[in-house]
Amino acid sequence: MFVPPLPVANAIVEFIVKGGPIMYPILVVGVAAACVILERLFWWSRLGLGRKPRLLEETYAALDAGDVQRAMSLSKDSSDPVVRMVHHGLNHHHTSLQGALEVAAGQELQSAGRFLSAMDTIVTLGPLLGLLGTVTGIMGSFTSIGDSELAVEKVTGGIGEALIATAAGLGIAISTLIPMNFFHSRLARLQFELEAAANNVIILVTQRKG
């Protein structure tokens, strides 16, 4: 486990303290964002390593030759989500091939789109918490005016609290928005591949029946 050097750790703690009480929920949101982003990066990396485009072509070839059993055997226990969808559809083609493919595609897309709504919430919540920190910091500055000889320090401290909270909230939102858009693009690409594969399977199976 990586432990930051003591001066860096002290600077981080000082930064959080200067940001005021609102920094603690911002910190929780930031940790949640980091965990979600790392989990999704790992998931998509593992998915990329499991893609088998050649196996998908071999499955198409077996279907084109009318050998459904071979296509089912080839696609069995595959790590490729598109091939898994094809296998599920072929296993249930006697009831409704299109319906089975749609169900399998939906399951794959649900797994691929996991935590995207949470990331969207984080992107919205981060700046809102930062804005709340801005409001509380400015309120603290105004209420301290004229209270004592240290009013100037309290005013500048309140303004610093407002700026730190705003910067932290925006930083979390920006850091989450970029990977979220990346994951959305990967999800859209996977959806296109699933739809294209489903159409290919339907065409290959129905043309052999015809």
Image (cartoon, helix red, strand yellow):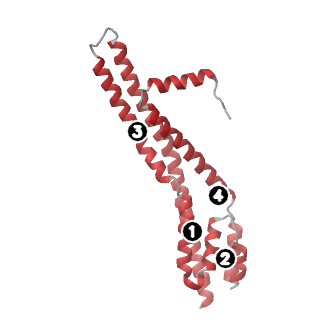
The answer to whether the residue labelled 4 contacts the one labelled 2, judged by CB atoms less than 8 Å apart, is no
**Residue, disc 3:** 127
Q: Residue furthest bottom?
A: 210
Is residue 71 found left or right of 159 in the rendered image?
right
Quadrant where the image shows the C terminus: bottom right
Q: Residues within 10 Å of mark 4 (few under 14, many from 20)?
A: some
Amino acid identity at mark 4: Leu
Q: Earlier in the sequence, mark 2 or mark 1?
A: 2
Q: Is residue 141 above or below residue 40?
A: above
Amino acid identity at mark 1: Leu
**Residue, disc 2:** 60
Q: Earlier in the sequence, mark 3 or mark 4?
A: 4
Marks 3 and 1 sit apart, C-alpha to C-alpha, by: 36 Å
Amino acid identity at mark 3: Pro
Amino acid identity at mark 2: Tyr
Which residue is found at the position 58% from the left and 51% from the top? Answer: 40
- Depth check, mark 4 against mark 1: the one in front is 4
